[in-house]
Image (cartoon, rainbow, N blue to C red):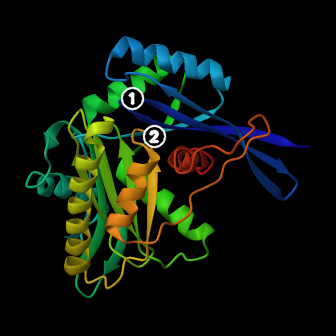
Amino acid sequence: MKKTTRSVGLDIDAYGVRAVVTARSYLGNSVVDDIENVVTITSDMTHENEALDTLKHLKNEISAKPIDHVVSCLAGKQVYASRMSFKMLPSDELLGALRLELRKTLPFNVDTATIEYQILESSSEKQELQILVTAVATDLLHKHTSSLKRCGLQPEIVDIVPTALANTAWHLNKAASDSKAVVLCIHFAPHACTLVFEGAEAPFFCRTIYLPEEASALDNERKTADSLIDEISRSLVFYKKTYRVPVVDGLVMLGSETFSKGFKKTIVAGIGLDLIPTTRIILESAKDPQPDGVFDCAMVLALRGFKE
């Protein structure tokens, strides 16, 4: 008997939401994933009432059900991700020790932050761990999940943009049959540009470049592009020198269509890295393929919903 479950990935920023609905069908030993729907809604998500109306509209657009898996992600100045070396400790002591260590670097109150970590490597000889640690202001997390629930969307997982981008870059690398490549993933949002370096054998590093409110205006795009090219080039030099990575193999461009297509082409030319193809989403109900790079992050978030 065929069994189908659905998962919804939500990529939300200040100007709207991008959603991908995936369906996973089980028949015997076979598993098939299909994209049922993609939805993008432009809205001012910084205003609570408008954001709630947008999420309610989205729920109706995708015919969300209580049994659907819902996965979203958070961004902003109260979100943090970093790879760090840390002394080896018993698991029941590690989180508390990490919280104390984060007091030195976290740009918001560590006492009111939700902290998680993943052990990437361990060395019994050095008594050292390599850890990917993430933190988010608990108030921001609660506000986010509360808004989704008020609109009939039950979030099972809330990721943060840097780690969601790393997962997306890994997914695209795998699709390109080059999982060992080191890539720079750039995610564009209305007021920020997030950089993530990702590779199976390369250190994780992320950085967010905040943009002025008028950055996406057509008459300011060239100035914004020049500034971003400079900042991204600095990050490339820093990453390769600090982590002794000789080559960054490619570039992934993701996020909302805040800027024109010419803007993204200018960024690619200015950085000088080969562009890695994003996922071509073609729906039976749509005449043309969906815009490149717009829905990749939401799609990978949706796929995460099947793994919990």
Q: Which residue is mark 2?
A: 257
* Label annotation for residue 201: none
Amino acid on which the number 2 mark rests in the picture? Glu
In the image, residue 130 above or below residue 103? below
Tell me which corner region of the image, top left, top right, bottom left or bottom right, holds residue 159.
top left
Amino acid on which the number 1 mark rests in the picture? Tyr
Place of residue 136 in the rendered image (x, y in percent of width and height, measured from the top left)? 27, 41
Query: Would you call the spot at circle 2 few (<14 residues within 10 Å), some (14-19), or many (20 or more)?
Result: some
Q: Which residue is mark 1?
A: 15
- Residue at 52% across / 45% down in the picture? 294
In the image, residue 10 above or below residue 152? below
- Residue at 32% across / 62% down in the picture? 132
Residue 73 in view of the camera: yes
Is 287 in front, or is 138? 287
Is 233 in front, or is 209? 233
In the image, residue 42 above or below residue 121? above
Q: Estimate the spatial distance between the alpha carbons at disc 1 and disc 2, rounded to whole Å.
A: 10 Å
Place of residue 26 in the rendered image (x, y in percent of width and height, measured from the top left)? 81, 49
Residue found at the very far front of the displayed protein: 219
Residue 216 in view of the camera: no
**Element under disc 2:** loop
- Residue at 58% across / 45% down in the picture? 291
